[in-house]
Image: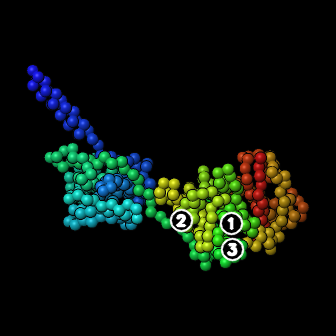
Amino acid sequence: MRKTFTLAFLMGIFGLFTTNLFAQEDASIDPADIRYWIGEGEKEVVFIVNWNEPDTALAWGYRFSEEAVTVEAVMDAIAEADSRFDYQAASGWLSDITFNDGNLDLALAGSWWMFNVNGSTAMDLYTNITVGDGDWIKWGDESCGVLIDPENYFYVWEKEVAAVYPLADEAMIDFSEILYWVGEGEHELVFAVNWAEPNRCLAWGYRFDGDFVILKDVMDKIADADGRFNYVPGAWGVDDITYDDGDLHLALAGMWWLFNVNGMMGMVGYDQQELVDGDFIKWGDESCATEIAEWTYVWTQEVEPVSVYTGMDENSNVSFAVYPNPAFNETFVILENSGLNVVSVYDIQGRLVSSQSFVALAGEQARLSLENLNGGVYFVSVKSENAVSTAKLVVK
């Protein structure tokens, strides 16, 4: 009786063991969590590789338009787009898959390698197997996998899958291309801002003496010298940075803003960040940035040098005043020059709110209704046939 009990007990344990073993599943990732998509089209697959030494699983996304694509086509597209990724193959068999970003140096290390499609072992060469919309592919190495079906060499890889970040470089500009330099001294740096809606990046040059200068001082000096540029300090940094030259009405539009120094995110406040000769500083908005690592962003928009500032009203026949300012339900624009004037109102993101045309005599006023506007900062632009001038309006 005791022997029978022991045998039954062992069989029960074996049953639990085998049940748990075959219940193991290949780790995957939600397509919504993929950060780097390659290709174009309405259909999507996820491509994953599980390496060992160290045990690491990384994922890319691939988009396409065809009904199905081969695993080989997916891998070739990723290898072409992402220089960190590569693979070696001959006669339909892979000998290695590698990833090297300067920190991680990964390669498959076992004696042979296999791949799963949607968690099941692929039964043909990667050059022949096709995948469709919603599928996911994972290559792995048996040395870091779990063998759940020895007869069919069925492995799963349980390592949590991490999304690969896109490969991108911060857009720069050569110092020799800068047109407008503020300040004097033997040292030089470049200050740039990348805006969204529209996506534009503008740059100034700044000259100084001494070993270093604080970023806030650079911004203050540029704001003092260039009437087109301004910024709004906030409790946690900068609430907004604006540029208005009568044609461009730019403002940062995201939830929060940050700056890079020489392509690396600033780690202290802008009122503490020290800058030295040769530095490149860029403020940006995450809505027009590429996240290349957690909390690390770059802006790839081409950098344009701003023109030399000569004054918004210089050589202009347009002159006007806005009152009251701040205003509530209405304000008035006093046109001090005769002729046809187009009076336009833009919001802080540069979007046109209203536009009216007036044929005015000197001293006449144009009434602007503000009843439909939310409280905030706006720009009033008065444009004649050959000139334009802009003023800031605060609506309460």
Q: Are marks 1 and 3 in contact (CB under 8 Å)?
A: no
Q: Earlier in the sequence, mark 1 or mark 2?
A: 1
Q: Amino acid at mark 2?
A: Gly
Front position among marks 1 and 3? 3
Query: How many numbered discs?
Result: 3
Residue under pointer 3: 209
Residue displayed at 76% across by 58% down: 392
Crowd tier of the residue under label 3, counting other residues whose Cα lies within 10 Å: few below 14, some 14–19, many 20 or above: some
Q: Earlier in the sequence, mark 1 or mark 3?
A: 3
Residue under pointer 1: 218
Picture quadrant where residue 357 is located: bottom right
Mark 2 lies on a secondary structure that is: loop
Relative vertical location of residue 153 with respect to residue 104 in this rendering, above or below: above
Locate residue 373, reporting x and y percent: 73, 48
Q: Amino acid at mark 1?
A: Val
Locate residue 396, reporting x and y percent: 77, 47
Q: CA distance from mark 3 to mark 2?
A: 23 Å
Mark 1 lies on a secondary structure that is: helix
Q: Nearer the viewer, residue 306 or 183?
A: 183
Mark 3 lies on a secondary structure that is: loop
Q: Is residue 298 left or right of residue 366?
A: left
